[in-house]
Amino acid sequence: MVENEVFMDWEKQQDVIAAVREKFPEIPFPNVSLEPVFFGRGPRKVLWEDTSIVTMAHHEEDGDVLTPVAHVSSQYLLVPHEVVIQHIMDTIESMDNRFGDPLYTISLPANGAKLNFRVRFPESGFKVKGTKTGIEKDVQPEVRARSSYDKGWEYGSEFGAHELVCSNGLIAFKIMEGRSKKHRLNLSVEEEAAYITQGMESYVEQNAQWNKWADAMLPGQVVHDMLEDEKMPFGPKHLSEILALPEAGTSETLEQWINEGQVNGWRLYGVFTQFMTHELESELVRAKKEPAVTRFLSKYLDAA
């Protein structure tokens, strides 16, 4: 169990780090430390007391390679990725399997400087009406926790839905809501559990809204207005790509649906999330686009 003091105590974190690395041996977690900052050389070298450097070490054949990733203040709390992961797993365990067995996925963008930890609940999934042929899409609730050593991401988590869009495992992530915490703050298991419970309640309500989107047929002009809106998250340079993107599972395109008058809100959302999830290579870019896509489409579709 990751207690509050573990977030503050570097020595107590070591047991947690070892346990998580044993559980996920395939993940190349970097070693991380806070190093002092000095000015000058030799006997005139002076310590800069209010600043440290976050340093990562990756093991290679000829030894550890050290990489400085951020200058931080004396108030900065360095929380290893492994501690964040254990904290989320402790939270799930404390909820007595309320939402079914979780599936865990870990990615480390920016060469390990960032963490994206995903927890999916397949047993709590719902069906959303998908295409004009009546095919339903399976969407499953998912929590994503993010953190970073380079100050690019604050400790934060978001609740959304994992959609399997075709039989080969292609997925799209639909974000619902999120919150973040500065690294200098502690988080409790109770707080995290309350957030997940609230997210699950919102997920049930959101699923009903998504089904309404599936029933809402959008005129072609409305779709074109959306795509030409200056606040469209992907910008005009991607417009032709989005119009011509084959939908996973049907190979139909948004342009084809517009011409046939077959665009509903859920299918449009699917095109946007498919483009974002699988055409944008950078996980860092996707992390910025996910909430922007949800806000943008909700503005149009909730009023449809």
Image (cartoon, rainbow, N blue to C red):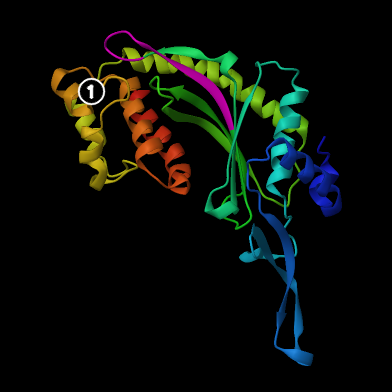
Percent x, y for residue 85? 69, 38
User: In the displayed structure, does residue 194 sit left or right of residue 143?
Assistant: right
The residue shown at (74%, 39%) is: 22
User: In the displayed structure, does residue 96 sit left or right of residue 262?
Assistant: right
Q: Nearer the viewer, residue 244 or 56?
A: 56
User: In the displayed structure, does residue 79 sit left or right of residue 239?
Assistant: right
Percent x, y for residue 300? 33, 28
Percent x, y for residue 16? 79, 42
In the image, residue 78 lies in the stretch drawn in magenta: no
Dividing the picture into quadrants, the one containing residue 105 is: top right
As drawn, 222 above or below 208: below
Task: Give the position of the N terminus as an image quadrant.
Answer: top right
Can residue 304 be seen here? The reply is no
Which residue has dot 1 on it?
A: 252
Residue segment shown in magenta: 130-143
The residue shown at (29%, 25%) is: 247
Dividing the picture into quadrants, the one containing residue 135 is: top left
Q: Secondary structure at mark 1?
A: loop
As drawn, 270 above or below 1: above
